[in-house]
Amino acid sequence: MAESVRIGVVGCGFFARFHLSSWKDLAATGADLVAVCDIDPEKAERAAKDFGVARWYTDAREMLAVERLGLVDIATRMDTHLALVRLAVEYHVPVIVQKPLAPDWTQAVQIVETAARAGLFLAVHENFRFQSPMREVARVIGEGAIGAPSWGRIAFRTGLDVYANQPYFLTEERLAILDVGIHMLDLARFLMGEVERVSCETQKRNPRVRAEDTSTMLLRHRSGAVTVAECTYENRRLPGSGIETVVEIEGPDGAIVVDKGFRLSLTSRGAMTTRDVAPSPLA
C-alpha cells in the first residue's frame, strides 16, 4: 500500500460529495480522509457521518490548525477560493481547488502566484481530460489511427435539472461556459492542439436563468484544425440526456466517435471497430 496522505475537505455541499466519495474510493492507494469542513454545521456533520470521517469542522482555519494535513481539497464556490488558498498556504498545506478556479482572471493569477511563492503544490479539480474515455481518444489519435486531426466536435448537452441541486446557478452572471464550457475548451486543446482563434454564440433559453445556459464555440487550432465545442443545460432530446461528453474527431485516414453510453467507434483506413470505453469507478 502507498504511503498515506492525510486529506481534509473544505465544503460539504452537493458537488463536494462526489469529491468525498472519490477520496474514500482512493483509500487503498493512500488517501486518508481525516476531516471535513463546512460553514453549515448540518452539512459538515452529515458528510462526516456518511463518509466515515472522524472529525468535522465549521471553520477552515481551525481544521488546518488542528489536523496535520498533507492535502486540502477546496470544494466550495469559486468566490471563496482565493481566501481559502491563502489560508492553506499560511499552514503550508498543498491544495486542490474545485473548478472554476476563480470568478475572474485576476483572482486566478493571484491563486497561482500565492501557491508558487510558497513552493506548494496546486491543482484544479475535475479536469475532463483525465477521464478514461478522453484519454483513450488521445491515445488512439497519438497512434496515428486517423492521421492528424482536422475537424472535431466536443459537446456536453444535458437536460437534467441542474438547478435543483445547485440553485445558485439561476442567479450567476456567467454560467454555461464557466461551469462546463471550460471543460469542452480544455478537451479541444488536449485532443486537437493549441488554439489561435475563438468565436462564440451564447443563448439564454431558460427564462428562469440570469446568464447563458447554452454556448456554441468555434475554435481554430494552430494546426489549421477546427473544433465546434458545445455546452447546454437545455437539451430536450429524448431519450433523456445524462452527463456524458460526446466527441467526434476526423482526420485524413478516419474518425473517432465517443457517443452516449461511452461507446467508441473508430474508422481507420476503411475499417471500423467499436468498443466500450466506460470509465472505471476510480476514473
Image: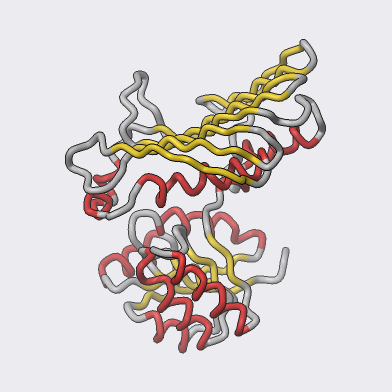
Residue occupying image coordinates x 18% and y 38%: 207
Specify the farthest residue to the top: 270
The one of 137 and 230 positioned closer to us in this rendering: 230
Asked whether residue 20 is in view, the answer is no
Rendering coords of residue 33 (x, y %): 52, 68
The one of 261 and 247 positioned closer to us in this rendering: 247
Q: How is the image coloured?
A: secondary structure
Residue occupying image coordinates x 52% and y 53%: 126
The one of 191 and 58 positioned closer to us in this rendering: 191
Asked whether residue 179 is in view, the answer is yes
Rendering coords of residue 266 (x, y %): 70, 21
Rendering coords of residue 242 (x, y %): 41, 32
Rendering coords of residue 58 (x, y %): 32, 77
The one of 205 and 128 positioned closer to us in this rendering: 205
> Based on the displayed image, in which of its 4 quarters is residue 271 positioned?
top right
- The answer to whether 207 is drawn above or below residue 9 in the figure is above
Residue occupying image coordinates x 65% and y 65%: 30
